[in-house]
Image: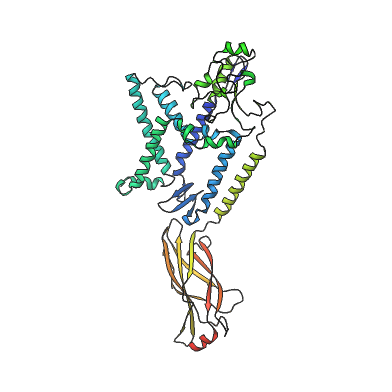
Amino acid sequence: MSTEKKGIKIPTPWRIKRYYVYAIMTAFVLSIPWITVDGNHLFLLSFDKMKLHLAFIQFDMQELYLMPFLLMIMFLGIFGMTVMGGRVFCGWVCPQTVFRVIYRDLIETKLLGLRKRIKNKQQEPDMSKAENKVKKVVAILLWSVLAFVAAANFMWFFVPPEDFFAYLASPMDHLTLIGFVIGIAAFLIYDVIFLQENFCIYVCPYSRIQSVLYDDHTVMALYNPHRGGDIYDENKEKVFTKQKDLQAVQPNAECTACESCVTVCPTHIDIRKGLQLECINCLECVDACTAVMGKLGKESLVTWSSDYEIIDQKGKTKFFRTKILAYMGLIVGIAIILGMMGSTKEHMLLNINKENRLYSVTKLPDGKVAVENAYEFLLQNTENEKHKYFFEVSLPKGMKGELLIDKPSAPFTAVPGIKKKKIVVLRTTDMLVDNDRKDTVIPITIRAYALGHEDRIVVFRNSTFTFPRSDIIRDAK
């Protein structure tokens, strides 16, 4: 994976390593929507069916309290990544960069030869030639196809593939979905082909916050002026364009002024100028300088290091410093909380509301007096298949008597995703409380469960049963 030139070991270019990362990441993102366990996805936020799938567990939309934790992990991860490695997210993970590499390096350069070399990103194709115009049209068409694939892949995280393709079979019934796919694809076509890296420079807000996150130990692509010499003055004005002029003023300067690090830069900056918001840490300038200086038997003047080590020369970069450890601790802590909350997922949702009437008292044919309380149960089956449900009621420990479910009289079926309202009537013929002064509110526990799955699909809810005064019971007799 490396070669020797004049005693200098030339490592595998960062560009090639990035390609490996891009390939793995692309395969991962494309495959995620297709991976299911018992019908549950690794990640799916379905607004169509009002479900959240996370780590192959299905949650109802009422359980979306998990989403803020996911967002916190994502943003803390990106911020922590920036503190440690600068805009490494932009150069190694961001879809914008991946798409530009596919279009510019693969389609325009490798497949069509519209651009001469990957290492020269500053020279735009000569569009005055008829041949290049045809190649440009072909490049746009090829990317348009990939843009629709990317748009569909994005939508699969909100509409699973099994539903997505079924909906495409009747497009007139799913115009919103079609509109989203076309809109996303159109944006990708404009962004990648016409807006290009201007998105990173002018549109993306990430570049504006990175300078707040940087510190002296943040690792980034850096030019070493102590070895290469100062190409720019204090006002960031370029002073030297030729090596002989540079060495006339700074005899020990090693920079050859070949500007390979400039021509290879996708955001069109000169890394020798110092830290710039446009730098996305793709490290192509490091590769370019490594190749040039390697031929001279010297180490690269552009390295992936920190101000602390290269510019200030105070010592080695500290990777695991307090700030980084704090980010890691927060991410781990939030992940633990997310895991704990996710593990308590309820396989059914149940809301219980007591009716306005406190109770009803009825004399039965056998002479007993029945006290009834009515409730409205709102139950939702959050599983993927329908089940039959029923309830049990228990009184506080030590209380004599029994509460029976008068209505419904038999288990009932609830299909997935549909809220089912049931009027539930609890009845007792026992003298639960003997109190002549006031009605008594008795705490009760309601256990709801799916028949055949009592150990897994079960929830407990606390409610109350109002029992009338003793004189009301006697009068009813």
Q: Residue at x 43, y 27 (%)?
A: 104
Which of 41 and 423 lies nearest the eye of the viewer?
A: 423
Image coordinates of residue 253 in percent, x first then y, are 62, 15
Image coordinates of residue 408 in percent, x first then y, are 43, 72
- Color scheme of the displayed model: rainbow
Quadrant assignment, res 143: top left
Which of 411 and 49 lies nearest the eye of the viewer?
A: 49
Q: Is residue 315 left or right of residue 182?
A: right
In the rendered view, tell whether residue 181 sits above or below residue 265: below
Q: Residue at x 62, y 42 (%)?
A: 328
Q: Residue at x 55, y 27 (%)?
A: 283
Residue 1: tell me if it is visible. no
Which of 64 and 405 lies nearest the eye of the viewer?
A: 64
Q: Quadrant of the N terminus?
A: top right
In the rendered view, tell whether residue 176 sits above or below residue 225: below
Q: Residue furthest front?
A: 235
Q: Residue furthest right?
A: 315
Image coordinates of residue 95 in percent, x first then y, are 47, 35
Q: Is residue 242 left or right of residue 227?
A: left
Image coordinates of residue 19 in percent, x first then y, are 50, 29
Q: Residue at x 38, y 23 (%)?
A: 112
Residue 270: tell me if it is visible. yes
Q: How many marks?
A: 0
